[in-house]
Image (spheres, grey):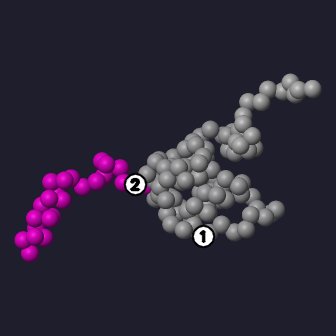
Amino acid sequence: MTDSTPHWYDDEAGPMVRLYAMTAGRARPSSEAFDLMAVVHADSGPGPLGEGSALSPEQYAILTLCADRPRPVAEVASDSGLPLGVVRVLLSDLLAEGLIHVNRPVPPAQLPDAHILREVIDGLRAL
């Protein structure tokens, strides 16, 4: 007898979890702080993942990645193997819980003018 259930993934893939299950059905982060170059700092390394922990395994993995050094959001997504949208939602949860801090890059409109920087460099060289 053969199994009539279609086999739509290979055995090496392991257990499959839908992305909306990782984010509790949310598709957008609750904070707009997570552009690709925003740098994520973990306040401290993640504690042990026990029964009382409110962290999902994916959140725990993200905290572990950011515990050794601050990382940009794009690098967190790449190193965790999760899609960027999922990482942004999980990071917004971690931010809401106070487990991470986010430093956003300075918008180009707020950067000093190149002409002013050139004048400062020329002035320093004149000293």
* SS majority, magenta: helix
Question: Which mark is drawn over residue 44?
Answer: 1
Quarter of the picture holding the C terminus? bottom left
Magenta span contains residue 102:
no
* Left or right: 18 as drawn, with respect to 78: right
Identify whether 43 is placed above or below 82: below
| Sequence-earlier tag: 2 or 1 | 1
The foreground one among 70 and 12 is 12
Q: Residue at x 67, y 40 (%)?
A: 19
* Left or right: 106 as drawn, with respect to 16: left
Q: Residues within 10 Å of mark 2 (few under 14, many from 20)?
A: few
Stretch of the chain drawn in magenta: 104-127
Magenta span contains residue 115:
yes
Among the 4 quarters of the image, the one containing residue 43: bottom right
The spot of residue 70 in percent (x, y) is 49, 63
Q: Residue at x 72, y 54 (%)?
A: 56
Can residue 82 be seen by looking at this rendering?
Answer: yes
> Distance between the Cα atoms at labels 2 and 1?
22 Å
Query: Regarding mark 1 in the picture, which secondary structure is present there?
Result: loop
Q: Residue type at mark 1? A: Ser
